[in-house]
Image (tube, rainbow, N blue to C red):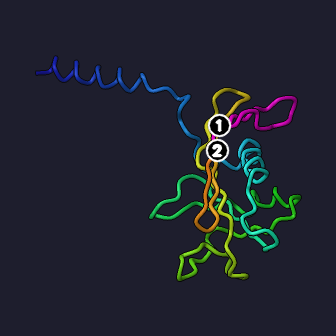
Amino acid sequence: MTRRTALFAALCLGLAACDSSDTARLPLNLYECEAGEAALRHLIAQLPDPNPGVAKSYSIVLGEINRDGMTPASDAFTARFADLKLKFVNAFLLKDVPPDHIIADPETRLAAFVLQLRTLQQSSATTWRAEVGWSYKKEFGRLKLRIESKDGKTSVVEEK
């Protein structure tokens, strides 16, 4: 019986050792880095304008969005996008406006873009893989990106 237990334990440890840390996602608090910023800036540049001429608000969410809630980006991270001259709202402040259940800025009651940095994985010392998405009213989109840091500059080098 002891041999079986020892063999079983050895097999379990062997399987656990097969896990590659290359696929491990970063903790959400580490999404607020240069790679995360580059991914979101790329996403913002790709956004459509479904309602031309209508003022828009933007909100950044990190990780998954599910029934349990979401993790908004910190105000310090959001402040990095000030040069874009866009109105950012903390995700916790967004409201669900009936009757269509549109996610809206509480001040203007107009629909807000929700920008999601869904995943961020470091694949080498200078490269990352990211998945970003956006939603506005009932429209949405998602991109898979490869991000590279070269000569002190972090930028998106591939989009799928």
**Secondary structure that dominates the magenta span:** strand
CB of mark 1 within 8 Å of CB of mark 2? yes
- Image position, residue 42 (x, y; %): 76, 46
Viewed as shown, does residue 69 lie left or right of 88? Answer: left
Instruction: Kindly indicate the quadrant of the structure image that contains residue 119.
Output: top right
Direction from residue 141 to residue 15 in the image, left or right: left
SS of the residue under disc 2: strand
- The residue lying at 41 percent from left, 23 percent from top is 17
Residue 57 figure quarter: bottom right
Pick the residue in front: 21 or 157.
157
Disc 1, SS: loop
User: Where the C terminus falls, by quadrant?
Assistant: top right
Q: Quadrant of the N terminus?
A: top left
Viewer-proximal residue among 22 and 140 = 140
The amino acid beneath tag 2 is Leu
Q: Is residue 117 left or right of residue 8?
A: right
Give the magenta range: 144-160
Q: CA distance from mark 1 to mark 2?
A: 6 Å
Q: Closer to the N terminus: mark 1 or mark 2?
A: 2
Q: Does 86 appear above or below 80? A: below
Q: Name the residue at 69% across, 37% down.
A: 159
Q: Nearer the viewer, residue 70 or 101?
A: 101
Q: Which residue is under mark 2?
A: 143
Q: Which residue is mark 1?
A: 160
Amino acid marked by disc 1: Lys
Vertical side of 113 occupied by 152: above or below: above
The question of residue 99 being in magenta is answered with no
Number of marks drawn: 2
